Image (spheres, grey):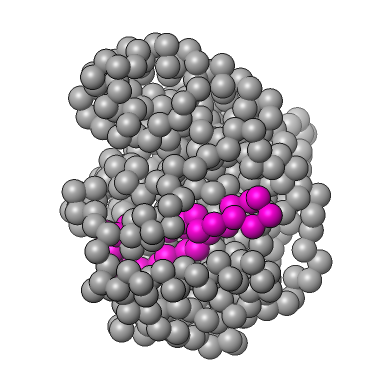
Amino acid sequence: MITYSIEELHQLFKTKRLDPKTYYDDLFKEVDFQQKRLNAFVTITKDKCYEDLNKADFHSLLSGIPYVLKDNYNTKGILTTASSKMLADYVPVYDAHVVDLLYNAGSCLVGKASLDELAMGGTNKSALTGPVFNPWDSTRIAGGSSGGSAAAVASGLVPFALGSDTGDSIRKPAGYCGVVGFKPTWGRISRYGVIPYASSLDTLGAFTRNVRDMCIVTEAIAGRDERDMTSSIKPVPHYLNHLTDDISNLKIAVLTSVSNEIRNPDIKANFNEVVKTFKKLGATVENVTMPRELMRTLLPTYTIIANSEATSNHSCLDGIKYGDRQEGTSTDEVMINSRTDGFGDLVKRRFILGNLALATENQERMFRKAQRVRRLIVEEMNKIYEDYDIILTPNCGSIAPKIDEANDDRLSDEYLILENHLCLGNFAGTPSLSLPSGFVDGMPIAVNIMGRLFAEQTILNCAYALEKALGFANQYSREG
């Protein structure tokens, strides 16, 4: 089966050089094969996909185009589990806002993708259906929490998939799987109908295999939604129409507070080559730093804020209002039994931490303190954006780990800073994109491009120029 970009597939369907029914028949054979290999799906929506196809007119760019949703997006009449036992039988009565938008655009839903339970995690190993495997090497993780979406795109099944990003949950798996992952500005895309993690950090976004496709998808799902009062009223630009590879006017800040922590010599060499490439493209590229004491607070600050907000957001999952109900002799016992049975160990630990931070006696020295540190971090980022358009970092410091690997040195700066710095974009609400930049030991690696609030076009242009220069667009792996 040949894999196409959105624009290529659109032209083939529109000009009738490719029969859509035949294409989708072949696609679902491939879906079955890849599901056995990667375990990327919670639900395969074959019947729904053919229903969508029957309504497609192939006039717009996304009409008739297959896609995948992370399984925390509500889909009317279709199982939406967030990969948690607590929601194993949950079938929504309404669609998320972006699902409505894609339906109206004529896109065809292939399936719902696996994630870390309730989107809490970075490995996709805590999913109710088991871990998701990396298409380039099925002994390795795809990353999380949006691992199923990343794997679906990286395996060539679909040209795009949607995910959610609270700390790095789109960008980290995108880097591990060798695809483009984009988290736009907080509020640029409505979160109505998406099961939350941490509301002040959660951002919706997409995976594609090239930057042009990312422009198409982001424009299609962005914009104001009156049902989500946090969604922005700013008009959505025509990202594809304004896309350019001329970045000679850009000022790029290399955040050495992150890049200096790279230990892998091949990843370091790759990052240095990216810096040289930007200079050859005419951009002004200079080194900047952020205070080390603040960079070392990224993980604890994120952990406290995210898990406190998650504890509040998911208090309704008690077996009475929502969720799988376990028997008990009282209301309290039903809640205790339901939550004990319904959540995995990782989620339970996060709820315990969140409750601890929100306890009246702890709020000032834990939750409020974390909020103040977050503000200091954002202020330091804004100082950089006064002089620079882009902040450039490595996406992470390693290739995708083996399924059974664990990082024992959790207090090193390599881990605290290098492996957790992508949450900078969530703290500030700024757009952030991960772009494939090469291979190490046969596995893809990536760089991350961050920009000012609502500067999606600048980031997309910067990524497009680098993508053209490096030549890693449209890569995928079916065999590993």
- Up the image or down, 306 lies above or below 120; here it is below
Query: Does 25 lie within the magenta span?
Result: no
Q: Residue at x 77, y 34 (%)?
A: 329
Q: What percent of the width, then of the height, locates residue 280?
A: 35, 72
Observer able to see residue 78: no
Q: Nearer the viewer, residue 197 or 267?
A: 267
Residue 364 in picture, x, y percent from top left: 58, 79
Image position of 480 (left or right of 457): right
Task: Give the residue drawn at x 24%, y 54%.
Answer: 243
Q: 117 left or right of 3? A: right
State which quarter of the image contains the C terminus.
Answer: top right
* Quarter of image, res 90: top right
179 w.r.t. 107: above or below = below
| Highlighted magenta segment, given as a residue range | 433-461
Give the residue at x 45% y 38%.
161
User: Residue 133 location, x and y as percent?
Assistant: 68, 40
Q: How many marks?
A: 0
Q: Is residue 266 visible?
A: yes
Up-down relation of residue 2 to residue 199 (above or below): above
Residue 28 horizontal/vertical position (percent): 53, 18
At 50% from the left edge and 55% from the top edge, which residue is drawn? 436
Comparing 346 with 458, the one in front is 458
Q: Residue 444: within the magenta? A: yes
Q: 475 or 199: nearer the eye?
A: 475
Question: In this image, 296 relative to 390: left or right?
Answer: right
Q: Is residue 469 left or right of residue 112?
A: left
> Does 335 sit above or below residue 168?
above
Q: Considering depth in this image, is 319 or 16 the residue closer to the camera?
A: 16
